[in-house]
Amino acid sequence: MRFSEVRILFVLLILTLFAFACHERASSPLVGPLPIQTITTPKDEAVMVYVPAGEFLMGTSDADIEHFKEIFPLRDIARFNNERPQRSVFVDAFYIDKYEVTNEQYKRFLAETGYVPKQYLDYPPHNEPNFPAPVLEWEDAVAYANWAGKRLPTEAEWEKAARGTDGRHWPWGNEWDGTRLSGNDGTGLKDGYKETAPVGQFPQGASPYGAHDMAGNLWEWVSDWYDPNYYRTSPPNVNPKGPQTGDGHVLKGGGWAENLDFTRCASRLGGNPGSLLRGFRCAIDTPLVE
Amino acid sequence: MRNIFLSLILIALMAFPLTFVFAAGEVAIYTGITQWIGKAEADEQAEICVGMLDDAGITNTWYDSDGDAGALADWMESATGDGGLDICVLYGDLPPEIYPEGNSQTDGSIAETFIETTDGDTFINHADYMFWGLAGRNREGGLQNMMDIDGIVMWDDDTPMTVTAEGKAISPTLTDFASDRPFHIDQLEGDWEIEISLAQNDDGTRADPIIVRDGNLGRLIPVIQTASGDEPKGAIAAEIIIWLMSTTPVEPAGKLSTTWGELKAVQ
């Protein structure tokens, strides 16, 4: 073998290794199904799933961005800037609602307390009992959580509950699959529902810890204030609770009407952007129930 | 006296080409309520738009508070049928002050009347579904009533938009992107027709931005209907407005004949 041939083989080897490196995120093995532990809280009769203490990958990495360039070729990469950099974050164990809070649960709260929500969309097609409650104001979600003896999850808790520890893009994995979530175009032709769907209709899209509808259906409030630059300010890596203030509160998970890149676990939105239909699910610390 | 008359003639002749630079219309930008785009991001884009319009000498008013919707309604009523091309820029919401919520006035609203004169008055919309309304107060009915086209919708997330030759010429800032609420060209009916498609999908059934016009009446221009504020919505809107106003001749009845009439009176 001549020297030039050896050199060509060497270059090919390097290129092959480089190609593998570039696709590390997309091809890295996903953590398999985890044992799902649940409890039911008495006040709101909500099933909650257990998320153990530990670290997980929060946000979006450079390798993810390269993957996004392939799967969202026409999206401005700047859209993902508020999710960067990715970092390892530790959160204590907690429970999170298996489903988004439903209209049935929210109306029970209203009936028992006489609370007057600022903006709760109690009209068709969103107000069926087993549909997620469209609670457009963060304060109205907090009021429910207080009544139920719970709280809103932090953004870190929400994201860990949705994607587990392996940094996957969506609750089910790294590849888009429109059959695994409530997401449609208003015609009802995609998932059988014109807009939102009853909670728990897409078990195939459940998260590694067994939480449903964490992609699609309603955007979900978390407790953190929204600051698009927060991840770049070296926030705490242990039980982060977000900035002191911000442009509204963070919304996670995308909704029935929004495009696929917003339904990624790392996606985050702030600024109370108008008509986005948003709801919520609650969390509790484990010592309170153990 | 003769010198004065000749001077007036000279001034009139100098003014003549200037009247063709921009139609005698105004622009109103409303960011009081925004949808699919945060208020801060909408304000940022509106500021860019205002700056470019100012530089181009186009009269504009920015209504940036939700309490400004009444003032927007007043502006719209005064602009309707005034002989000039007036443009209202929305960031995803159609205030109930100009289109009563829940489609409770399907015809004759301030907003609909605005686009039903030969002034060619125009709505530009960014971000969310055109005329959907906060929390879906109008839903699909908003667009359908405003256009008087039953069944027209604006669905189809992630539709690839390729900039056309006309789009490149009119808006240098515009690049290929994915529209989440493109205009459905294939659902146009009646006198509505495409005036200019600035970007569209491969089979030409969806477009964004696009200028559609109701015969010789008003126009609708969806511009970058995507969630969030990452795209340069404000700059693209300004480029389209500047192009539209610079290519729309002033109504002679409203301008030149008046000038000549005044000259004759002086004579």
Image (spheres, helix red, strand yellow):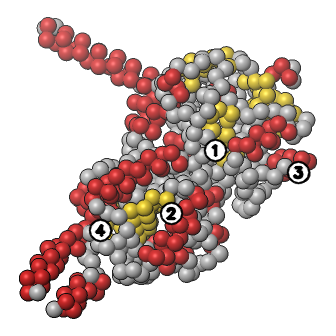
Q: Percent from the top left, x then y, of residue A275?
A: 60, 54
Residue B153 in sight in this render:
no
Quadrant hosting residue A216: top right
- Earlier sequence position, callout 3 versus callout 1: 3
Q: Percent from the top left, x then y, of residue B199?
A: 33, 58
The answer to whether marks 3 and 1 sit on the same chain is yes
Q: Which residue is mark 2?
A: B130
Tell me the amino acid under the disc marked 1.
Trp
Q: CA distance from mark 1 to mark 4?
A: 40 Å
- The local secondary structure at tag 3 comes to loop
Q: Which residue is mark 3?
A: A114
**Callout 3: chain:** A
Q: What numbered label is drawn on residue A116?
A: none
Q: Residue at x 14, y 7 (%)?
A: A3
Tell me the amino acid under the disc marked 4.
Met
- The local secondary structure at tag 4 comes to helix
Q: Is residue B125 left or right of residue B215?
A: right
- The local secondary structure at tag 1 comes to strand
Q: CA distance from mark 3 to mark 4?
A: 54 Å
